[in-house]
Amino acid sequence: MKALVKTKKGEGFLEIQDRPIPQFGDDEVLIRVAYSGICGTDIHILHDEFAYYPPVILGHEFSGEVVEIGKSVTAFEKGDYVVGEPHNLACGKCYLCRNGHIQNCMDKRSIGWGIDGSFTSYLVMPEKLLHKVPAGVSLKAAAMAEPAAIVAHQLLERARITPGDQVVIMGVGPIALLAAQMARIAGAEKIILCGCTNDIPYRLKIAKELNCYDRFIDVLQEDAAAIIMEETKIGADVVVEASGAGSAICTAIKVLKKRGLLCAIGMTAREMVEIPWNEAMMKVLDLQFNMSSSYNGWNMALSLLGSGKLQVEQMIGVRPLNEWQKAFADVENGKAMKLLLTPMAD
Ligand SMILES: [Zn+2]
Ligand SMILES: [Zn+2]
């Protein structure tokens, strides 16, 4: 099978290789990959900016069909459409695992960077990390379950956005638009999106189609902090940082109301970010960092996809696996919202 492999450490070294169909164990299933989303993490791995274990097949946001099952598998059978939590090799013994946070286990080696992933035709996953795709949800839409589960975990399970909340979202990418939709579903009264001028022709158009915000601010042309204070009167209840921009993190602190909450769902390109510490202190702000997704997050995301409340099809483009290079570039340059790679027939 053809697979997109990061062959060794360093900038680049990403290429299509021929790989054998993988072997599976008793508690595992073999999945024929349908679609696999390109994530910011994949771009970071291409540029050697994220931990990974080469040679490794990239791809961790997959949907597919079960084609073989191991001897002890009980919950899935051939023909099931599935998605899966990329929390492979979590130890099950550490304080994180035993408290239910397997996604943060220090032994975890996710598909797509720790072990072979889904930018290929066949993938092996343990039964215990899989979820069935709800009836009526396409395999294309299901490939968005992983990022949707991250957002559901953070916004619905941890931040507990409630009716009446005024929510500011920093960014107009896939995570931001999932967050805006989930804030709306949770009953947020006002949702303000912050982006840049070059988000307007393409990304904002998709946000408009999704009807997921009340006000857009072009932070390069407008005074974001002043507008948010005018719109919210006393400041935002919650700011979701999904832009990776240091300036957005500063603005977040300035526009939160007292005892407000800053949710960080994104890395920033810079190691150090300067923030108005005393202002955050005087406002008694909460700050939640988020990395990866929980079981409940997956449950919520799949339920919302199944009910049709969460719309993802508008955000998706599909490219053949052998056009990965252009697809990666389009994602990196903001020329696409979410691109899924689909394996070529081989
Ligand atoms: Zn991802
Ligand atoms: Zn562990």
Image (cartoon, helix red, strand yellow):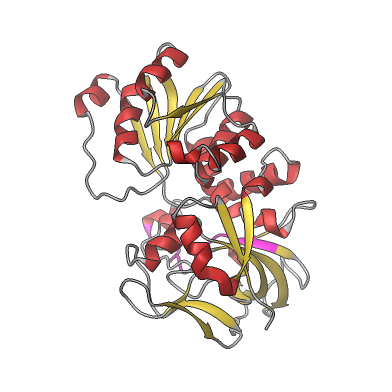
Q: Within the magenta stretch, is there residue 290?
A: no
**Location of residue 178 by image quarter:** top right
Left or right of 324 in this view: 121: right
Residue 207: percent from left, percent from top: 59, 37
Foreground of the two, 216 or 152: 216
Image vertical order of residue 109 relative to residue 338, above or below: below
Q: Within the magenta stretch, is there residue 90?
A: yes
Residue 237: percent from left, percent from top: 44, 22
Can residue 111 be seen at all in this image of the molecule? no
Residue 4: percent from left, percent from top: 51, 76
Decide whether the magenta segment is chiefly helix, strand or loop. loop
Q: Residue at x 60, y 38 (%)?
A: 205
Q: Quadrant of the C terminus?
A: bottom right
Image vertical order of residue 163 relative to residue 171, above or below: above
Image vertical order of residue 75 relative to residue 338, above or below: below
Left or right of 319 in this view: 273: left
**Which residues, given as a range, are shown in magenta?**
82-94
Left or right of 305 in this view: 276: left
